[in-house]
Amino acid sequence: MMSISGQFTGLDMKNLIGAPLNAAADANLQMAETTAQFIQKVGFDEHGKIRTASFGYTQKENNPDGTVTDKEMNIDIPLLAITEAPNLQVDEVNVLFDMEVKETEKSESTLDGGGSFTGSVNFGLFKATVSGSVSSHSSNTRSSDNSAKYHVDVRASNHGTPEGLSRVLDIIAANLAPMTASSTVVDENGKALQGAAKERSEKIKALSAEGSRLESAVRASGENLSNSIDRIRKATVSLKNKYVVTMTNLIDQAEAESEEKQKLITNTSTIQGSFDDFAASIADNIILATTAEGQGQSIDVTFDSIANLKGCSDTGEIISLTGSKKTGGGETDTILVAFKDGVTKQKAQYDAIEKRDANKEEYNKLLYGETTPSGE
């Protein structure tokens, strides 16, 4: 009989273990191809455009005049966004191989033999005779048993929508918006408006939509004006710092407690004061200049407010910055350009406010038969 160790000789362990793993890898490849085919077939048409499913619904919108607008809305959703893409992947492969070798031996001794005996027993008045025989049997038995178990456990799961596809769908979703297919205005009883009533209702809706747009224009013009004022202020601070540095250096070089040093300190305060006053009144001066321009008045490009700015010479003497090309090289040019831009932005805001208020007046007159004060 073969020995127990000899039972394992010749087993192809490489194939026993490697074959299931290779099969799992091939299965993953096939499932990836299935996912790709699904995306290509379901998600895109023959021209490479995304396939969509169209959904329609009715949206009710209450109008300021008490009527209701029934809007038939449509929205197209990509099929890939409402279907689950198959994305199966083998997550785990367990290869179990058990081989059991049994060798058992059973032995029995066999012996056949016999004998007899006879005897008698007295019980008072009675007498009994007893006789019998004895036999024996034994045998030898030998047996062996081999068994093997080979088990492959494969587990796969759906990993959901691939990351790349999810990002594409997010981009598409960000651009999805319902579109109005048709619109019907009805009264409080659900009957469609006719004639003058319909015309009035549509006019009110148009004015309301225009009012929202004009309100946004007012806010935008206000932001533009604020940005322009900030540019003027920054240009003012930059030029102010230039002169303050010059004056500070002169003060440091002057003799302590000297009359010259005191004069330089006074001049520095004058320069700083002129710039601070200008910066504090930028918005007011822009309004004044815009009003003058609106009234057809001629405006000097230097403006009176800028004419009050003071600078200094190399020796610390006070100079006027208006027309200072001889001494300073036109340092206020940046401020002047920004100031004129501010006047333009202020005018744009006035125009936006005027249009918004006119829209409000017409809207309220049509809706309520009255007007409201401008600017409310």
Image: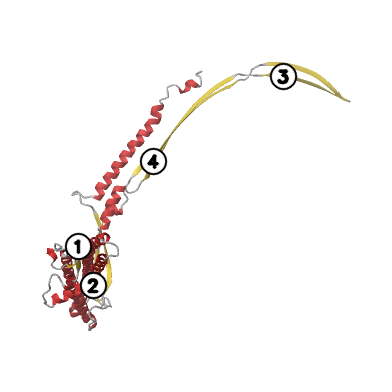
- How crowded is the residue under tag 4: few (<14 C-alpha within 10 Å), some, or many (20+)? few
- Picture coordinates of residue 184 (x, y %)? 22, 72
Question: In the image shown, does 208 or 251 lie closer to the viewer?
Answer: 251
Q: Is residue 43 above or below residue 370?
A: above
Q: Amino acid at mark 2?
A: Ser
Q: Which mark is residue 91?
A: 4
Q: Considering the numbered disc 4 on the image, is that residue within a helix, a strand or a loop?
A: strand
Q: Considering the numbered disc 3 on the image, is that residue within a helix, a strand or a loop?
A: strand
Mark 4 vs 1: CB contact within 8 A: no
- Residue named by callout 3: 134
- Picture coordinates of residue 303 (x, y %)? 15, 72
Q: Amino acid at mark 4?
A: Asp
Labels 1 and 3: the sequence-earlier one: 3
- How crowded is the residue under tag 1: few (<14 C-alpha within 10 Å), some, or many (20+)? few
Structural distance between the alpha carbons of marks 1 and 3? 151 Å
Question: In the image shown, does 104 or 279 lie closer to the viewer?
Answer: 279
Q: Which mark is residue 281?
A: 2
Q: Amino acid at mark 3?
A: Val
